[in-house]
Amino acid sequence: TRQIQLTARPQGTPTPADFRTVEATLPDLAEGQVLVRNTYLSVDPYMRGRMNDVKSYVPPYALDAPLEGGAVGVVEESTSGSVPVGATVLHMAGWREHAVLGEREVRVVDTDAAPASAYLGALGMPGLTAWVGLTAIAHLREGDTVFVSGAAGAVGSMVGQLAHKLGAAKVVGSAGSAAKVSWLVDELGYDAAFDYSEGPVARQLAEHAPVDVYFDNVGGDHLEAAIQHMGTGGRLALCGAIAGYDHPVPGPRNLMLVIAKRLMLRGFIVSDHGDLAGEFYRTVAPWLASGDITYRETVLDGLDRTVEGFLGLATGANTGKMLIKLG
Ligand code: NDP
């Protein structure tokens, strides 16, 4: 079975030379374990941070060991009383074709409620991130104007739709291409959207001011522009800052406005909010099933395209959730 390892800590933008694919031998199952054949691997922006050797909210990846990440797969062998052969499971042993895991390291998912891949995107960690940011962090209120950056990504595409469901009056998104902007407005119900490569964010956002809630996936110029156009008492959920993951970018130069407008900026990490996962799933799974909320996936085929998929997050190669499909 094959797995992908990190061979060097990327400097700036990662390259394929920072990774290698190795052939590995699987251990025999001990009591209470399962052999999983992965069917979908997730690649996520936060993985870039784990490639650096710095202390953060998750430990760095080890070099010359299999990378980790969200994945779903099918149980092919089991010595577990609770996870049978044939079950579809969600777990963190991604970047590889097979994994031997303890029964408590996997979660059985309901593939009647949604396709397995959705548990890595709309119904999974990215969807929960959108939910937590809007509800627990930004305290979205009926009638709010919401601005979302990275709006056509896995998290952002859920943020806009959930914001409407939760009572937002107007939702504005920014994304990196005309095709993504059309998708936001025509299919996801965004009230307005713009392509940030077409001109300064501050200028394009101006017509939608004042903004009540900003959901930040990007940082940099987007955050500065949002601060400029927030209304008094506005709330900013700082979720990600992808513009600066490979190379640092300047922070907002207008922090005096945070004071003048009594803004609330709050960063969050989704894994601190596992207590909201049940409420999220019970609320959003029916919306997905009814088609009230839609999602898209960009799917690359085969383990050999995993690195390409990961690198593509930094260039906007994905619309919706970026996934790798195996076998
Ligand atoms: P996405 O699916 O949104 O993929 C990343 C997207 O970022 C790309 O498609 C690209 O879209 C955009 N992008 C890349 N570089 C830039 C740039 N320089 N400026 C503006 N946009 C850029 O990823 P996710 O939905 O998984 O994650 C979105 C954000 O949320 C990330 O910042 C991530 O780190 C963060 N996150 C935070 C969590 C938390 O707990 N706080 C949990 C999960 C995610 P485009 O074509 O529009 O440029």
Image: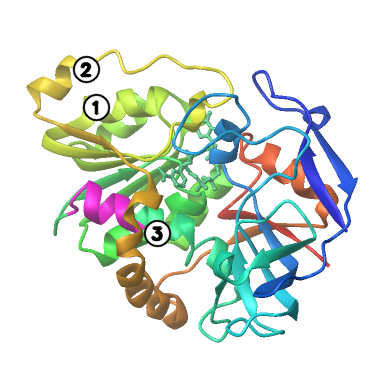
Q: Quadrant of residue 193?
A: top left
- Between marks 3 and 2 in the image, the one whose residue lies nearer the viewer: 3
Q: Is mark 1 within 8 Å of ligand 1?
A: no
Q: Quadrant of residue 166?
A: bottom left
Residue at the image point whose x is 64% and y is 75% from the top: 32
Residue range corresponding to the magenta coloring: 131-140
Three-letter code for the amino acid on which mark 1 is drawn:
Ile
On screen, residue 29 above or below 226? below
Disc 2 designates what residue? 255
Q: Secondary structure at mark 3?
A: helix
Q: How is the image coloured?
A: rainbow
Q: CA distance from mark 3 to mark 1?
A: 25 Å
Q: Give the number of the disc on residue 51.
A: none
On screen, residue 278 versus residue 136, left or right, reads: right
Q: Nearer the viewer, residue 28 or 150?
A: 28
Q: Position of residue 132 (x, y in %)?
A: 31, 54
Q: Are marks 1 and 2 in contact (CB under 8 Å)?
A: yes
Q: Secondary structure at mark 2?
A: loop
Q: Which quarter of the rendering shows the C terminus?
A: bottom right
Q: Are marks 3 and 1 in contact (CB under 8 Å)?
A: no
Three-letter code for the amino acid on which mark 3 is drawn:
Leu
- Between marks 3 and 1 in the image, the one whose residue lies nearer the viewer: 3
On screen, residue 15 versus residue 202, left or right, reads: right
Q: Position of residue 122 (x, y in %)?
A: 48, 64
Q: Is residue 259 rendered magenta in the image?
A: no
Q: Residue furthest front?
A: 31
Q: Give the number of the disc on residue 128.
A: 3
Q: Give the number of the disc on residue 227.
A: 1
Residue at the image point whose x is 20% and y is 63% from the top: 167
State which tag comes first along the sequence, 3 or 1: 3
Q: Is residue 132 rendered magenta in the image?
A: yes
